Amino acid sequence: MRPRHLRSAWAIALLALLPVAAAFAAALLPPHEAFALSARALDPQTLEARFKVADGYYLYRDKLKFNLDGAAPVTISAELPAGKVKHDEFFGDVETYRGLVVIRLPLATAQASHKLTLMTESQGCADVGVCYPPQRQVLTLDIPAAAAGPSEVVVAPIGRPAWLK
């Protein structure tokens, strides 16, 4: 056990750091603001997802996953744009996105005139060196009839970490 004066010094040092830690955490955006997601159906065979990545943040290209919810979830092969290569201290050389990212999601079969539930998973970081846990978001999209034009844009509700199933 440490002498009493050393325990007190540690306690004072930790208390002095609390405002710094709180300010640092307060400066970070919540994930739904740092990586704002919206989606729409362009037509009965194509969905479009958009991530608006806030300044000072980036999204990992290889951490994006898209599924259609149903009796058995169906993975969608996304048409991802090229990202910018970044050397990440944890993941090595990875592709990342900043700003607006538009992703096309072709459907295997036409899905006209009903609703689909799109499940997304993503992960990103802040430039200050803080990475967010993977986020899962669910959006319900109206699929338009064949020549009706794109559906309304749906903004994702606040997501939750993917590890919280």
Image (cartoon, grey):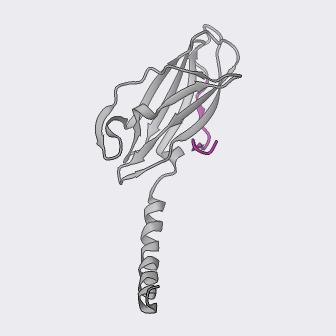
Q: Residue at x 51, y 42 (%)?
A: 134
Residue 116 drawn above or below residue 7: above
Q: Quadrant of the C terminus?
A: top right
Q: From which residue to which does the magenta span run?
A: 152-165
In reply to whether residue 155 is colored magenta, the answer given is yes
Instruction: Choose top left, top right, bottom left or bottom right for residue 145.
Output: top right
Q: Residue at x 65, y 12 (%)?
A: 111
What's the magenta bit mostly, secondary-structure-wise?
A: loop
Residue 29 drawn above or below residue 23: above
Q: Residue at x 33, y 35 (%)?
A: 94
Asked whether, in this view, residue 48 is left or right of residue 10, the answer is right
Asked whether, in this view, residue 32 is left or right of residue 139, the answer is left
Residue 134 drawn above or below residue 29: above
Instruction: Choose top left, top right, bottom left or bottom right for residue 155.
Output: top right
**Residue 18 percent location from the top left of the image:** 46, 73
**Residue 102 percent location from the top left of the image:** 44, 27
**Residue 85 percent location from the top left of the image:** 29, 34
Asked whether, in this view, residue 85 is left or right of residue 78, the answer is left
